[in-house]
Amino acid sequence: MIFANPSSPEKTSERLQPTGWLRYFSFSLDHKVIGLQYLICGFIFYLIGGSLASAIRVELTSPISDFMARDVYNQVLTLHGTIMIFLWIVPVVNGAFGNYLIPFYVGARDMAFPRLNAVAFWLIPPAGLMLISSYFITGAAESGWTAYPPLSITTPATGQIIWIISVLLLGGSSIFGGINFIATILKLRQPGLKLMQLPMYCWAMLGTSILVVLSTPVLAGTLILLSFDIVAHTGFFNPSMGGNVIVYQHLFWFYSHPAVYIMVLPAFGLVSEILPVHCRKPLFGYTTMVYSIMAIVGLGLVVWAHHMFTSGTPPWMRLFFTIATSFIAVPTGIKFFNWVATLWGGKISLNSAVLFSCGFIINFVLGGITGVALAQVPFDVHVHDTYFVVAHFHYIVYGGSVFVIFSSIYHWYPKFTGRMLNENIGRLHFVLTFIGFNLCFAPQHWLGLNGMPRRVAEYDPQFTFVNQLSSAGALLMALSTLPFLWNVINSAMNGPIAGDNPWRALTPEWLTSSPPPVENWEGKAPLVNEPYGYGRSTKNPKSPNDGERDTK
Amino acid sequence: MPVPKTILAIFSGAIAVAAGIWIGQNVNLLPIEASENAPVYDELFRVLFSIGTVLFVGILGLVVFSLIKFRRKSGDSEDGIPLEGNLSLEIFWTAVPAVVILFVGIYSYDIYDRMGGMNPLAHGASHDHQAIATQERVWGGIGSGSISDKADSTISPLPIEVTAMQFAFLFHYPEGDIISGELHVPTGRRVNMRMESKDVIHAFWVPEFRLKQDVIPGQPTILSFTPTKPGRYPIICAELCGPYHGGMRSTVVVEKPSEYEDWFNKNSKIPVLET
Ligand code: HEM
Ligand SMILES: [Cu+2]
Ligand SMILES: [Cu+2]
């Protein structure tokens, strides 16, 4: 096993690799190339998943099932959920930004295991293509992203098996990534850089990777058992053969609740990097931020049964999971207050990165509030499996994670490409996305409370108008992608040159050229002990970490 | 004379709290209340809605205010204040959510108990419901609670066996050996349902009753409720169960006891015995 040793000139990424655009199609070992591969690949899947979402919203403009066949609707629904989670948010907030940033943040020239890293990425495109192609071969899986048996055992087997294999591959990719991040953060840190001096995103990725490594194998095992039930007619989860369907739900959610933190903890980390730079202030409450991440990791492992309150769980179990789930709101709340305190008294640039980050704060607070309500058993028995839950988790995964992904793209694009994005188009993108998103999902709370279940292609006609409102919001969200796409493509060729550090940021990825050279720094890696040392300049003209700057 | 900042802050905080509470108490987002635990549910809902609105409006206000107040003036390239933290503030905003959560937890426990959630098996299980009285493992939904006990003392609960299948519900009344696709229940009398699925997982949901319970193959589940308001309400399957899941609906007809009696006698296959 070879560790990239930052202080020696030893090379871990091979020099003899394609350069130019071709390297993005190669088995490159450069963490920056792999990061961008994750990002672009994820975005392509986002466009596919988004088209499926639009198809769902078109079907729901009328109360009858008229746009697509009922089984196709369920396939579209299943593909949408699976793609958005396993091929867009998880790979992008972890794989893309993690690979690009973590080696910089620990002062390394690459990840701990560059080959494993490339393998982890190259598992994703085939898994994704396989998943999507299943639709054209025999029809995709149609039992939802949760694949509850016995439905998943009785629906057409081929689609379900392909679904299982894809998710297993994606889970494997995720585990490889997680191991790599843990090793890189703990073992490749530059001498002289203490754990409590790391940028917050490192802590978020450390916590997330622990969750990945602990919980993803459980999902893998569960899905393998499920596949036995489907192909070999075993009876693990098949009640007609004495199996137990509730056991599947416990195993599934033991992974899939942590999975929601796998989607959102890295986003918390990214926001913690973005806000201080554009507010010109230190991140407020570094230490409590670290502890709250770790508290979320710990609690996040023991709340899974809040997805099963109506599954016939015994009262003591309902109570335990209510309490554990509610308490997650405390460390989560700390982080939000700390971000607001980071804004307070700053010199905030109202650019697209900040707008998307603040949009995230607002959306996520609403999603967190409905989350705490859902954690209360008596509240949940009415709204479980309704559009209220759909609204809750879209406020979290879209209003939270996806807003942060956009914010991060606006923030790091100059580093990725060496060019600036157009800020006016960026703000337009924000306004359209924010309005479209809220118009799409806020009314769904009401739908759920008043009797619309989730995962249906037809519904009570009294809900027609509100569903059309929601679909109009979805249309706006779809349209908002266009200015964004134009912006990133056009700016890559014609944007103004960014320079090394357009935001005057202090974290290490900015202390090198844009885009950075293959091994990150031409000379010695800078030692950054104060990644958030803003505001010293007035008292002390020498800004923190100054002497360390790479002189190439 | 300029108003001191703290007074202004306290004042705007008070307005946010008052607005939140008013909205939570006065904006109704819920359908008709048609069972005994619906008003209890709505009480919990209004409290959570109030707290949620206060928190949301508060944070929204702080973020928007900061973005406006602290935005960078053009040409200003200074940094903000080098404030890295404040222990007492951080303790404060750890403690406040913790207290709110504690309150919400205890309060919702109380609500849950009043709905009968804490003893779904103890009560309804033993008397007059043969199926439940047997030794098989029955997993609970919301059961019989203190509210229902009042009704309980005079009238015995109405047992109903529910079978769910792709894509319909069947209701069997052991007392009259009636099988019906529509659920008929009288007001003011507790209904004890024992549910089982023939194929995949379904869920029994009546929004106007604020109740939902999965109907599971191979594992009976129970649900008790006491209807209060006559009317026809939808029964909705809430668990994805196949292509026609969206169409898997039925109706619960809540009737005055005399009307229910008529319906029952008309359909009963067991002759009514003289009492
Ligand atoms: C304050 C923190 C949160 C609490 C208390 C909370 C609570 C809950 C509860 C109780 C449910 C189950 C509702 C039901 O099915 O009846 C739920 C569903 C869900 N939550 Fe959260 N949640 C929180 C944060 C999050 C986060 C951070 C994410 C993702 C990034 C998330 C994503 C989801 C998803 C995807 C579902 C639906 C899963 C499904 O049934 O398909 N939640 N949440
Ligand atoms: Cu969860
Ligand atoms: Cu169904």
Image (tube, rainbow, N blue to C red):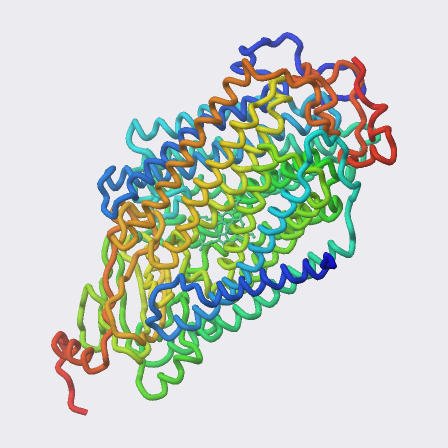
Image vertical order of residue B14 relative to residue A350, above or below: below
Image position, residue A26 (x, y; %): 54, 14
In the picture, the quarter occupied by the N terminus of chain A is: top right
Image position, residue A268 (x, y; %): 62, 41
In the depicted view, which residue is nearer to us: A348 or A172? A348
Q: For this view, does B143 lie left or right of residue A59?
A: right
Is residue B85 at all visible to an observer of this figure? yes
The residue depicted at 20 percent of the width and 65 percent of the height is B182
In the depicted view, which residue is nearer to us: A221 or B166? B166
Image position, residue A434 (x, y; %): 49, 40
Image position, residue A263 (x, y; %): 55, 40
Q: For this view, does B44 lie left or right of residue A69?
A: right
Image vertical order of residue A47 relative to residue B113, above or below: above
Q: For this view, does A481 lie left or right of residue A340?
A: left
Image vertical order of residue B11 relative to residue A202, above or below: below
Q: For this view, does A42 lie left or right of residue A148?
A: right
In the picture, the quarter occupied by the C terminus of chain A is: top right
Residue B230's image quarter? bottom left
Image vertical order of residue A365 relative to residue A108, above or below: below
The residue depicted at 74 percent of the width and 17 percent of the height is A521
Count of all numbered marks drawn on residues in the image: 0
Q: Residue furthest front?
A: B1
The residue depicted at 36 percent of the width and 54 percent of the height is A447
Is residue A248 at all visible to an observer of this figure? no
